[in-house]
């Protein structure tokens, strides 16, 4: 069964309150991809190390602290203009096990959730599992992998809908779902100091929102949740072993919804500032002639 993105029309009106009244500064209708009924349930979505796509900041923080206690966990922040900082990403490192994990959250104004996870495992000689056992373990966790156009023992991929059910995305011969999980947008890496957090540029993409939405929803990658595992193989006495594993998890439809909401939000800030400037100009007294 292939999951599809449904669409709904969201009409947004932004009101600016200034002085003795309110001025409506923006009223636009735009198509926004609709999420699953009741919202995204992180427990139904794929995970690695217990870090699920769709987790809230609090949920992900608790899970990350369990895996990377103390200074092994780094939290990074971003912000819009002069507004309060938010948690934009977290990074964990287990140096002894050579396990490195980074997660990214969607940006406000929508509730923040984990939309992208990247994990790197470096397996030292003497502790390198066989490729056969690693593939079996991945299949046990994520299910049967997709039949890939560029299929090989080194690359595996899975697709799901936003309810966590396996999906079978189809596309042209030159398209492969192995490219999907690694793509991310509408997120920021941030900086480790909340007081000096990374500022998101206070202006939206110059393309019209409807045009951006059309491009994003036409992208086959943005219709599913993806997991990709890339295995770097070695050979010990004729046995194929795994030296490194690179994993990517992406909640693509959620990325799209939150990115578009963020663009609307930034445009609203710009519209409000412009209207306030016009109002201030109108209230100035005419010069004495």
Image: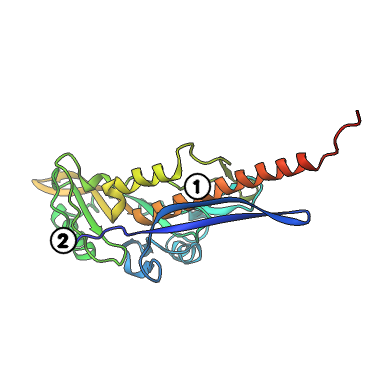
Q: Position of residue 201 (x, y in %)?
A: 56, 40
Comparing 122 with 136, the one in front is 136
Residue 263, disc: 1
Residue 220, disc: none
Residue at the farthest front position: 289
Q: Check disc 2: other Cα within 10 Å, few if <14, some if 14-19, many if 20+.
A: some
Q: Residue at the spot x=32%, y=54% of the render?
A: 249
Q: Find out whether the residues at labels 1 and 2 contact each other: C-beta distance under 8 Å.
A: no
Comparing 237 with 226, the one in front is 226
Comparing 84 with 126, the one in front is 84
Q: Residue at the spot x=50%, y=47% of the render?
A: 263
Judged from the image, the secondary structure of the residue bearing numbered disc 2 is loop
Q: Which residue, given by chain and number where applicable, does mark 2 sit on? A: 144
In the rendered structure, which disc, 1 or 2, sits on the residue that comes first in sequence? 2
In the rendered image, the quadrant that contains the N terminus is bottom left
- Compared across the picture, whether 79 is left or right of 181 comes to right
Judged from the image, the secondary structure of the residue bearing numbered disc 1 is helix
């Amino acid at each position: 069964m292939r999951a599809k993105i449904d669409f709904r029309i969201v009409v947004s009106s932004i009101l600016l309150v200034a002085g003795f009244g309110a001025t409506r500064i923006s009223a636009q209708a735009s198509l926004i991809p609709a999420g699953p009924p009741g919202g995204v349930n992180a427990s139904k979505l794929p995970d690695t190390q217990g870090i699920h796509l769709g987790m809230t900041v609090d949920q992900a923080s608790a899970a990350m602290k369990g895996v990377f206690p103390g200074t092994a966990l780094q939290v990074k922040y971003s912000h819009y203009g002069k507004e309060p900082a938010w948690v934009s990403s977290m990074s964990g490192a287990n140096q002894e096990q050579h396990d490195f994990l980074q997660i990214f959250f969607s940006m406000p104004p929508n509730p923040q959730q984990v939309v992208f996870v990247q994990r790197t495992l470096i397996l030292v000689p003497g502790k390198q599992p066989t490729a056969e056992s690693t593939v079996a373990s991945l299949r046990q966790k994520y299910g049967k992998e997709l039949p890939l156009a560029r299929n090989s023992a080194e690359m595996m991929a899975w697709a799901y809908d936003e309810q966590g059910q396996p999906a079978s995305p189809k596309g042209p011969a030159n398209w492969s779902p192995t490219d999907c999980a690694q793509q991310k947008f509408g997120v920021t890496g941030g900086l480790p100091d909340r007081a000096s957090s990374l500022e998101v540029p206070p202006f939206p993409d110059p393309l019209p929102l409807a045009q951006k939405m059309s491009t994003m929803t036409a992208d086959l990658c943005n219709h599913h949740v993806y997991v990709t595992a890339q295995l770097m193989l070695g050979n010990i006495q004729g046995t194929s072993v795994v030296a490194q594993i690179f994993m990517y998890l992406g909640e693509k439809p959620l990325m799209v919804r939150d990115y578009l909401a963020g663009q609307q939000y930034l445009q609203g800030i710009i519209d409000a500032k412009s209207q306030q400037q016009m109002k201030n100009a109108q209230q100035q007294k005419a010069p004495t002639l």
